[in-house]
Image (cartoon, helix red, strand yellow):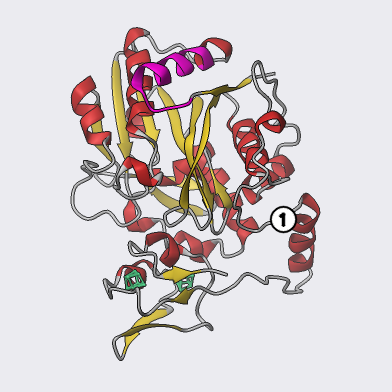
Amino acid sequence: MKRTAIVRCGSYDLKEVHGSLTEIIGATEFPEVAGRTVLVKPNVLSDSAPEKAITTHPAVVEALVMILKDMGAGHIIIGDSPGMQAGRFNPKASGIADVAARTGAELADFAVNPRIHQVGSLRIPMAEALDRADIVISAAKLKTHQLMYATGVIKNLFGTVPGLNKSPLHLRARKPEEFAALILAIFREAHVDYSIMDAIVGMEGPGPSNGSPREIGLLIGGANPYAIDKAEARIMGYRTVPIVSRAEEEMPGCTETEYPFLSPEEVRIDDFSRIGKGLTVGSLFLASLLSAIGIRSDRRPFPSFQHRTCRRCGKCIEVCPAKALSLTDGKVTIDKERCIRCYCCHEMCPFDAIKVK
Ligand code: SF4
Ligand code: SF4
């Protein structure tokens, strides 16, 4: 059984992060990297300052790259493609570009020359760097997520689908359980070998972009991504979340693990501000059962627009896969008949002008 290491790490001091990560790697099933090409996939949802807790902190990425180099990795690639990528991927504000420059790692833009992958019945463009990598490491951030309740090491690989190619996939998987299944399929297609989660400062409230930073003081790692995402959910106070629930349905026993250090129950945050507080394994099962027999049980709210805060940048209109948004009389208006409640607009609004409650 693969182990999941949860260790305390109180700051983003590079030395401290390096020490904690070394401890995690030593206690878990880390792949052999000597002489091999390693792709590190941080979460760079949008290129923003590390203090906002939207992105994997650069100190975590840097410490990981330093360890990989010490282990003799032949070539290291750091890559991603934000949802609203404008121009070439150059994540300066998040500090990720500087990590690549300092360490000599290649910075890969997943939007350049993507390769088509057959994922179930869908043909999906995915990062070319996946083809070159012998080893893939997901380096995620602990955050809430409006649709999936939590975004972790599995959902992080959705970023291998370049830029705006992500949002139309919501039309092919409209219900949360369908979207969770699609995310799992994309994750499997990426062949991830190891995962770490930056939970030193996570995000609570209306994540993954507009929530609030929350000091947690943990780093998590291991070769069982399902166990890591389950640990994340438990730390946040959920009994389960759609991606973990779906994974357990498809692969019974996949979240089984051993904790060599802390267990999620020991570090659970009782007052963590979550999304979908009432979610249980039973409610997820009931929702999919009712939908299978044609009864609509989806009570998810529609997004609402705060016109005073809105700067009319148009990003929500651009990202909406259902073409449910338009600018009418200087205000963003929503066609609820079209809206599929994917919350891409909420995720991409740079001014926190969209609420979901
Ligand atoms: S993305 Fe946000 S700020 Fe921009 S138009 Fe939409 S609601 Fe307004
Ligand atoms: S309006 Fe927002 S939630 Fe509705 S379909 Fe468009 S992007 Fe998704």
Q: Main secondary structure of the magenta part?
A: helix
The residue under the point 47% across, 84% down is: 335
Which of the 4 image quarters holds residue 270?
top right
Quarter of the image that includes the N terminus: top right
Q: Secondary structure at mark 1?
A: loop
Quarter of the image that includes the C terminus: bottom right
Q: Does residue 128 appear in this view?
A: no
Q: Position of residue 243 (x, y in %)?
A: 62, 47
Q: Position of residue 261 (x, y in %)?
A: 64, 17
Neighbours of disc 1 within 10 Å: few (<14), some (14-19), many (20+):
some
Q: Amino acid at mark 1?
A: Leu
**Above or below — where is 33 with respect to 319?**
above
Question: Residue tagged by mark 1?
Answer: 279
The residue under the point 35% across, 82% down is: 326
**Residue 64 or residue 262, whichever sits in front:** 262
The residue under the point 36% across, 66% down is: 319
The magenta region covers 10-24
**Residue 298 or residue 75, whichever sits in front:** 298
Which of the 4 image quarters holds residue 42?
top left
